[in-house]
Image (tube, rainbow, N blue to C red):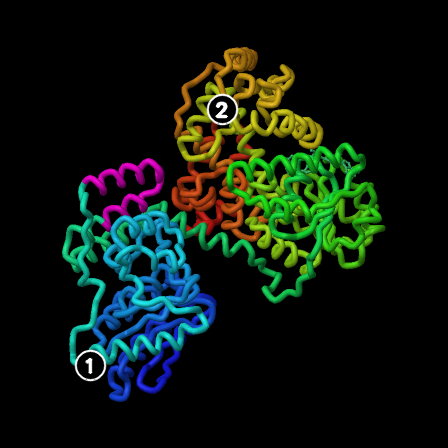
Amino acid sequence: MTAEYKVHGDVAVITLTNPPVNGLGLSTRIGITEGLEKANNDTTVKAIVITGGGKAFSGGADIREFGSPKAIQEPNLLSVIRACENSAKPVVAAIHSVAMGGGLELALGCHYRIAAPGTSIALPEVKLGLIPGAGGTQRLPRVIGVEPALNMIVSGEAIKSEMLAMLPGQKLFDAMAQSAESLPEEALGLARKVAAAHADGSPLPLVRNLPCKHPQGDAYFQFTRNMVKGMAKNLPAPVKCVDAVEAATKKKFEDGMLVERDIFMNLMLTPESRALRHIFMADRAASKIPDVPADTPKRDIQSIAVIGAGTMGGGISMNFLNAGIPVKILEMKQDALDRGVATIRKNYEAQVKKGKLKQEKYDERMALLSTTLSYDDIGQADLVIEAVFEEMGVKEAVFKKLDEVMKPGAILASNTSTLDVNKIASFTKRPQDVIGMHFFSPANVMKLLEVVRGAQTGKDVLATVMAIGKKIRKTSVVSGVCDGFIGNRMIEQYSRQAGFLIEEGCTPAQVDKAVEKFGFAMGPFRMGDLAGNDIGWAIRKRRYTEKPDLKYSKTADLLCEMGRYGQKTGAGWYDYQAGKRDAIPSPVVVEMIEKHRAALGITARKISDEEIVQRLVFSLVNEAAHILEEGIASKASDIDMVYITGYGFPFWRGGPMNYADTVGLFNVAEAMKRFAKNPHDDAQFWQPAPLLARLVAEGKTFN
Ligand code: NAI
């Protein structure tokens, strides 16, 4: 049982004991209903307190039960809340730390509520593509008012208890405790007080009986609905929050509850909610590595050294400064250091100007930053991250030096995006301490961190880097060593398809539009212009000698030969006006493509948006299936996290693998077979990867 029952004099206290956040799993729910029954049968008990042990009142549903029969088994949350309401003896919720989702709904089913200051109060269901399903949309407006309640429900954001306590006329809290420490005593006091007040048998207050009205009713809801629709383009849940709260103001309580239930059940089945729930779980799963147990010892990381103060070195440093960890940057020349530090300053100053960063914080962060030209100064760092030029010779020199100067036990990381981490490790006599930390540009902004596990990387090193990734608030995903790791290896196939599409008849703008309509932040050609088309060019030049049989469209090379590297040269796949980032379709580029097509003897054909999207997205999926099979990624959900956090894949589609599962892998494989028959495409590539073929044969999914 994960709820404890104790009698303190004439008050029974039910304490939820389901760490970490007292999720309302089956055994906790049983504990609450049994406790209520016991208390009601005990003549010495006059009142009941429900509270949470440890670090929360309750964080809501128990995510470990998601999708299992236990999640809805009786007593379900609605029944537990009903048991609270029906208790003949007053039930007081003593709330502290966290009361979210089902936890808040439970509290709203109690007769009285007392809260400690600093408690985070939220109905975050919308973040999973749902609405609250146990009366939250019907009860919260009754205690804090329609507008504040709807704001909380639509945003899912937490608000501190003391802020809510200040709302005029609020009935959410009957009392605020002095502190979390004094809450248990004060809750007992409140319980005794209300027991005495109801000793005469007067009815106990129920939130459901409170009125719920909005003075501008229809106009307010219409306005809000339009606004929410505009903001939540691809997500159905936010607008449904408006519907549910509107029902609270227009229907009897029980009828409003039915509206809420109905909406909840329907949302549960939407692909968007499935995708959001998938991401929620995938995010948590990413930090779990099959052969690295959670209790693997970690090394202590108190200080960082960064080699190279360029684009990446500066951004990487900022992550650690933001987390309060001192950073020392090493460069070859003073002016490079000065430039690097100036860029960091400029970034922070922009944040200060926008009011996003306080001056003191900025000062604190800059005080943690130091620089050096000498390796003698960095030997004591616990973790060193190399971000120098992308050349094996340069990496070799740096890692040999690091091997000489770094203290034993220091972790040596490389930010390389294309080089072999095992080779880099071999430059040292401590390959177990070497690892890849592949940040994405801009490194202080992008959420993704690919943690590249070398053949000899120590488990403790891996565990430590995953933990530090969490500390700097990255989504860390483990990748094995291969060319491009997870993300870039897949994007190469996607880029190849984009090239074939323009050879066959598309314009860059048409491809970009189709992909952006699908939900990508940016299509492949706008992306190329932003990142610099010369980067792909360099990689292709290498491929032409490494893999001479691999087919590429020549168009991207022709573009680079014209000097059109992208935004940085003012022209790429698109034209750009000075100082602006708007991509203007370029007649010169279209002409280049048409000439090239003619030279190949291809007659342009009209390609549907559906085909464009399928070829691009399924190319990611097929390469990902190879990546999974080779063990480069340990689970499909990791690949989804890489694409959502690093490559602008629409999060509400749950990542490429989740999307493929939604489409059905049979359909995905059928499409691939069709594409393989296209003489202008790469038939070899479109053979479904063995893993994909196996899953199709077994009727299974990736996730
Ligand atoms: P960058 O050219 O902006 O910066 C490199 C810096 O390293 C320069 O300031 C240079 O002076 C310094 N440097 C070169 N050799 C050095 C040495 N021996 N000792 C000390 N400092 C040295 O390059 P960027 O873009 O920051 O890339 C650095 C690394 O990050 C490369 O391995 C690159 O592949 C990787 N990377 C780059 C991404 C990007 O989008 N730019 C994304 C992910 C990884």
Q: Assess disc 2: are there few (<14), some (14-19) or many (≥20) residues with their C-alpha within 10 Å of its C-alpha.
A: many
Q: Position of residue 174 (x, y in %)?
A: 29, 67
Observer-nearest of 204 and 182 = 182
Q: Is residue 237 magenta?
A: yes
Q: Amino acid at mark 1?
A: Ala
Q: Is residue 645 left or right of residue 372?
A: left
Q: Amino acid at mark 2?
A: Leu
Observer-nearest of 607 and 197 = 197
Q: Position of residue 222 (x, y in %)?
A: 22, 39
Q: Is residue 407 left or right of residue 691?
A: right
Residue name at image x 34 percent, y 51 percent: 152
On residue 501, the disc is: 2
Q: Give whichever of discs 2 and 1 has the lower sequence position.
A: 1
Quarter occupied by residue 685: top right
Is the C-beta of the residue carrying label 2 under 8 Å from the nearest atom of ligand 1?
Answer: no
State how far apart marks 2 and 1 are (Cα). Answer: 79 Å
Secondary structure of the residue carrying numbered label 2: helix
Q: Position of residue 24 (x, y in %)?
A: 37, 67
Q: What stretch of residues is rendered in magenta?
A: 219-245
Residue name at image x 66 percent, y 62 percent: 298
Please indicate, yes or no, whether residue 537 appears anywhere in the rendered image.
yes
Q: Assess disc 1: are there few (<14), some (14-19) or many (≥20) residues with their C-alpha within 10 Å of its C-alpha.
A: few
> Which residue, given by chain and number where applicable, does mark 1 sit on?
199
Please indicate, yes or no, whether residue 632 appears anywhere in the rendered image.
no
Quadrant that contains the N terminus: bottom left
Q: Main secondary structure of the magenta part?
A: helix
Please tell me whether mark 2 or mark 1 is closer to you in this view.
1
Identify the residue at the far bottom of this view.
Answer: 44
